[in-house]
Amino acid sequence: MTKTCSQYEDLCKRVIDEGVWIDNDRTGKRCLTVINADLEYDVSDNEFPLVTTRKAFWKSAIAEMLGYLRGYDNAADFRNLGTKTWDANANLNLAWLNNPHRKDVDDMGRVYGVQGRAWAKPDGGFVDQYKKIVDNLSKGIDDRGEIMSFYNVGEFHMGCLRPCMYSHHFSLLGGTLYLNSTQRSCDVPLGLVFNQIQVAWLLQITAHITGLKAGKAFHKIVNAHIYEDQLDLMKEQVNREPYSAPKLIINPNIKSLEDLETWVTVEDFEVIDYRHHEPIKYPFAV
């Protein structure tokens, strides 16, 4: 058993044992909550932080992050990549359905990747945060501000959901690339399974296209919670013994950000040595 494969279950047990019941206004559900959790993924050793105590659908998680890096704002585009993760928030969120900024079916508004690739400047035009990071890192430059932020407070009203994992800060030391990702809110049974995949993948793919060695990814979670209707299932899951972490293989033909923007799909990634327990279907809170 490795650290990567046990730290998820350790956090789940902590929420169960130490969590405080909180009423969540957005979902209308109660959840057990703890404040502050720090996870670490050793990407340098190609340990892919894929949960093993239940089957995790890693392709969907990568597809979602790939959609962010493309700046997508429509759930249909995410579906075309292979994930339905935005269907509910784009089409079933009542507050968003009544929002005058919503354009049409599947519209997500100015969330996540839109901010990462086209942050609106108050004096006109847009800032492409991720391209700036890739351009700098490809030249061996780290200006201590290689940060991609999705948290644009001034445009919350123009999107269907505030970002949960909202900041990705890359750091370069001696040819090795590191990543610090910060998440304000985390549905541990569902969201974290996706989010830890995405943090590790973002570091690995960014190192890959900039010609750098991937180091460690540090994942900060501020508010970690388990919803009341997920609790019994989670108690079952944490009693399962974790297996060793699998590894992620990237198509070597991927060379650049332009490749990610144009032809790359989830089929260009392969997970090997993934041993897991039976799936568990957790309820999702819209």
Image (cartoon, rainbow, N blue to C red):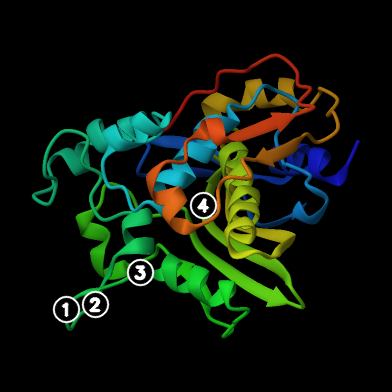
Q: Distance between the residues labelled 4 and 3?
A: 25 Å
The extreme front residue here reads 253
Label 2: state its secondary structure: loop
Q: Distance between the residues labelled 2 and 1?
A: 5 Å
- Point out residue 35 in the picture as x, y percentages from the top left corner: 63, 57
Camera-nearest label, 3 or 2: 3
Q: Indicate whether 228 appears above or below 35.
A: above
Mark 3: amino acid = Asp
The residue nearer to you, when weighing 82 against 40, is 82
Mark 1: amino acid = Gly
The answer to whether the residues at label 4 and label 1 have Cβ atoms under 8 Å apart is: no
Residue bearing mark 2:
121
Label 4: state its secondary structure: strand
Q: Distance between the residues labelled 1 and 3?
A: 13 Å
Camera-nearest label, 4 or 1: 1
Residue bearing mark 3:
128
Q: Is residue 252 left or right of residue 109?
A: right
Residue bearing mark 4:
185
Of the numbered discs 3 and 2, the one sitting upstream in the chain is 2
Q: Which residue is found at the position 60% from the left and 70% from the top?
A: 170
Q: Which residue is found at the position 69% from the left and 61% from the top?
A: 218
Q: Can residue 30 be seen in this view?
A: yes
Q: Can residue 190 be seen in this view?
A: no
Q: Is residue 138 left or right of residue 100?
A: right
Q: Quadrant of residue 236?
A: top right
The answer to whether the residues at label 1 and label 3 have Cβ atoms under 8 Å apart is: no
Q: How far apart are marks 4 and 2 (CA)?
A: 27 Å
- Point out residue 69 in the picture as x, y percentages from the top left corner: 42, 53
Residue bearing mark 1:
124
Mark 4: amino acid = Ser
Disc 2: CA contacts within 10 A as few (<14), some (14-19) or many (>=20): few
